[in-house]
Image: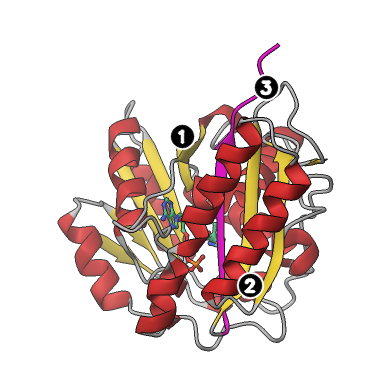
């Protein structure tokens, strides 16, 4: 595996991997890799001849009081994991390489970013869209893989790719990979390592309570009652706040007050011991 930190070298290496008819998949990450990321890498391997993984802790998607400085950085350990997966290219630019002095452009996607993390983290999705557009242009992948764990992020990137007619990758080659979970159901996340053992065990209430709420909604119970019960269970388990717990149309992310006849998603963000956890799960459409 080649590790590259300078853009002119990336362009040569990515171009040479794509020579002939070979295809290239990109898996964008912020590092601190876990099985969720490695699952994306394995799926990417099935979709293209070569895989490039990017590791870049993107300052533009962190708010002023968020964990940019504390975010785990472990390039050597990550590199060894990727090497073992047979990844050909690791793109690990510095902040200066990604955002040279004078950098002045931002991509803003309306609509899908309006609620949920978009409302709680102002500017977050502008930062994500901007860096992902740059990563696409830098690497020029045929396909790119993202986790469904970050459902709103995936919807934002797909919207951007459609709206800007991106060709590397085409919007329909932006692939969502189902959330990889710990044995107790908690979605894997680099931020789980912030949790104390006590909070880590309480955190498993999140996916359990979400599943139960979905069961109630699918059985015909009022959405508001199911969501209220979900919030109570999180509070009882030791979550200090619930940033949001809502039902949305799975594609547009418009809020739904009742289960409709299109696929929906239950999305939750909640804090425990200072750590903000997010999760989302499908809610099937109501039968006609
Ligand atoms: N448990 C998971 N299952 C599937 N994909 C995942 C999982 N966790 C992260 N990903 C995906 O990996 C990619 C890189 O995510 P990132 O590096 O931010 O990791 P993360 O674990 O989500 O970190 P954070 O704790 O910052 O949210 C994203 O597309 C993300 O959706
Ligand atoms: C897509 C991403 C790599 C952009 O920085 C990041 O938001 C992430 O890791 O999910
Ligand atoms: N995986 C999402 C990246 C973030 O929370 O900034």
Which of the two residues, 7 or 168, is positioned nearer the viewer here?
168
Q: Secondary structure at mark 1?
A: loop
Q: Secondary structure at mark 2?
A: loop
Judging from the image, the colouring scheme is secondary structure
Please tell me which of labels 3 and 2 falls first in the chain: 2
Q: CA distance from mark 1 to mark 3?
A: 36 Å
The answer to whether marks 1 and 2 mark residues whose Cβ atoms lie closer than 8 Å is no
Q: Which residue is mark 1?
A: 142
Q: Which residue is mark 2?
A: 99
> Can you tell me whether the CB of the residue at mark 1 lies under 8 Å from the nearest atom of ligand 1?
no
Please tell me which of labels 1 and 2 falls first in the chain: 2
Determine if residue 137 is in view: no
Q: Residue at x 74, y 49 (%)?
A: 225
The answer to whether marks 1 and 3 mark residues whose Cβ atoms lie closer than 8 Å is no
Where residue 111 sits: x, y (%)?
Answer: 83, 45
Q: Which residue is mark 3?
A: 286
Where residue 283 sits: x, y (%)?
Answer: 60, 34
> Can you tell me whether the CB of the residue at mark 2 lies under 8 Å from the nearest atom of ligand 2?
no
Q: Residue at x 43, y 58 (%)?
A: 187
**Does the magenta run of residues contain 285?**
yes
Position of residue 140 in the picture relative to residue 40 (left or right): right
**Does the magenta run of residues contain 9?**
no
Where residue 216 sits: x, y (%)?
Answer: 61, 39
Magenta part, dominant SS:
strand
* Figure quarter occupied by ligand 2: bottom right
Which of the two residues, 22 or 174, is positioned nearer the viewer here?
174
Q: Which residues are magenta?
A: 274-288
Q: Residue at x 36, y 51 (%)?
A: 52
| Quadrant containing the N terminus in the rendered view | bottom left
Position of residue 130 in the picture relative to residue 111 (left or right): left
């Amino acid at each position: 595996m080649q590790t590259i930190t300078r853009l002119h070298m990336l362009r040569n290496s990515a171009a040479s991997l794509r020579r002939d008819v070979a295809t290239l998949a990109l898996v964008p990450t912020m590092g601190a890799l876990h099985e969720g990321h490695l699952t994306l890498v394995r799926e990417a391997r099935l979709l293209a001849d070569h895989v490039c993984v990017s590791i870049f802790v993107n300052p533009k998607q962190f708010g002023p009081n968020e964990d940019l400085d504390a975010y785990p950085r472990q390039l050597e350990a990550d590199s060894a994991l990727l090497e073992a997966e047979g990844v050909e290219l690791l793109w690990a630019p510095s902040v200066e390489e990604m955002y040279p002095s004078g950098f002045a452009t931002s991509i803003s996607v309306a609509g899908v970013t309006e609620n949920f993390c978009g409302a709680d983290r102002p500017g977050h999705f502008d930062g994500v869209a901007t860096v992902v557009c740059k990563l696409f242009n830098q690497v020029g992948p045929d396909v790119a893989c993202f986790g469904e764990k970050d459902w709103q992020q995936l919807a934002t990137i797909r919207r951007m790719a459609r709206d800007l007619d991106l060709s590397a990758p085409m919007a329909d080659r932006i692939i969502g990979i189902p959330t990889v979970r710990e044995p107790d159901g908690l979605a894997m996340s680099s931020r789980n390592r912030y949790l104390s053992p006590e909070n880590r065990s309480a955190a498993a209430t999140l996916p359990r309570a979400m599943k139960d709420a979905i069961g109630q909604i699918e059985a015909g119970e009022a959405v508001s009652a199911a969501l209220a019960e979900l919030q109570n269970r999180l509070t009882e388990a030791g979550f200090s706040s619930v940033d949001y717990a809502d039902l949305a149309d799975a594609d547009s992310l418009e809020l739904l007050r009742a289960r409709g006849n299109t696929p929906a998603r239950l999305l939750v963000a909640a804090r425990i011991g200072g750590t903000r956890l997010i999760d989302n799960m499908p809610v099937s459409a109501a039968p006609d």
